[in-house]
Structures are given as structure tokens and as C-alpha cells.
Image: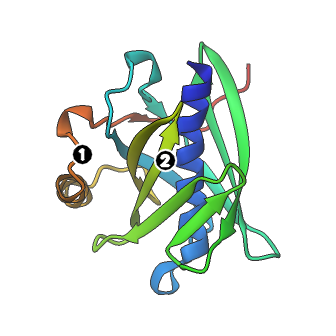
Amino acid sequence: MKTLACTILLFSLVASLQAQDAEPEGHNMEGTWYLKAMVTSKKMPETMKPKKSYPVTMTALDNGNYEVQLSFFYKDKCEEKTIEMQRTKDPKKFKTTQNIIVSVQEMSVKDHFIFYIEHQVFGMPIRIAKLLARTPEENPEALGEFKKFMKRKKLNVEYLVIPQQSGFPEAG
């Protein structure tokens, strides 16, 4: 289960980093981002669903790649991960050191992006879409656009998770 949780979190980080690398239409992806919503193509166990969302920090590296730092709780313990995202030939796609490809899609709503991953977990295909924003405040317009994206990708709205926004967790 911890492997699956780390994989899902890794997908999140990769998506975040890829967003920084893409810098669609000149937008700077460096900084703090908030997970607003997430959906997977397969039902996640309740213990795997993010109930709280902590800010993700993205930093541009000198070599053009990005470093993503994230925190999450797993089994009542704070976990911190740092992942490097590598540019690909496609400016809207990034690759992690774990060979996960993340597609970044800019939205019509300012400072919101969709991160989309198609990958295999334990030999099974899985698709993950995440809505990230620069601020923790709710934005119904962005959520509506995200739901339209879900419909186009045939992602079940029943699997949509909207986590509670939290500040940075304290290690412990």
C-alpha cells in the first residue's frame, strides 16, 4: 500500500514539475502550488485518498529541469519527497527519474493547470488527472473546466477527490 501511495504522490510531483518545465505561454511554473482536485481511472482505497492537501514547491534548476518538494501523511507519519523532473522534446511533457511521463495542460482559468499521467502500477494501467492552482482558494470555474476534461478522458466523476487545503505539515 505504501508503494501505491508513493506512486500516486510521485505522479503528483511529476505533474507539478512538468508544469514548471513547460511554462505554457510564458507562465512561470516555479513556486508554490496547491492540489485542488484529483481523479484516477481506478477506484482508490479510502486509505489512499488524499483527505488533506499540502503545498507543493517547485524550483527551477540550472540545467532546465525542475525539483519538486512535497509533503504528505501516510499511516499518521509525515513523509517528505523530492523529485527531479526532466524536460522532454515536447514542451508540455516531462519525465521523472522513475520514467513517469506527465502531460501539462494550461487551463483558461488563470494560474490553474491540469496534470495528466498515464502509467502502469503493479502491471496495471492507471490514469491520473490533477487540478493544481497557485492559491488555496476554491475556484468553481476551474473545477468545472476540470470536470469537462475528466469527461473527455472518460474519468469517472465518482472517483473525484477534493482534498481539504492545509499549510505545510510539521514533521513528526
- Image location (x, y in percent) of residue 38: 36, 43
State whether residue 158 is above or below residue 24.
above
- Image location (x, y in percent) of residue 96: 66, 56
Residue at the disc numbered 2: 119
Q: At 45% across and 66% down in the image, what residue appears?
A: 104
- Determine the residue located farthest toward the front in the rendered image: 123
Q: Quadrant of residue 61?
A: bottom right
- Determine the residue located farthest toward the right in the rendered image: 62
Can residue 167 be seen?
Answer: no
Residue at the disc numbered 1: 155
State whether residue 133 is above or below residue 61.
above
Of 87 and 51, which appears nearest the observer?
Answer: 87
- Image location (x, y in percent) of residue 103: 46, 64
Q: Nearer the viewer, mark 2 or mark 1?
A: 2
What amino acid type is highlighted by mark number 1? Leu
Query: As drawn, is 121 to the left or to the right of 141?
Result: right
Q: Residues within 10 Å of mark 1 (few under 14, many from 20)?
A: many
Of 163 and 74, which appears nearest the observer?
Answer: 74
Instruction: Label 1, secondary structure: give it.
Output: loop
Of 164 and 4, which appears nearest the observer?
Answer: 4
Can residue 46 be seen?
Answer: yes
Instruction: Label 2, secondary structure: give it.
Output: strand
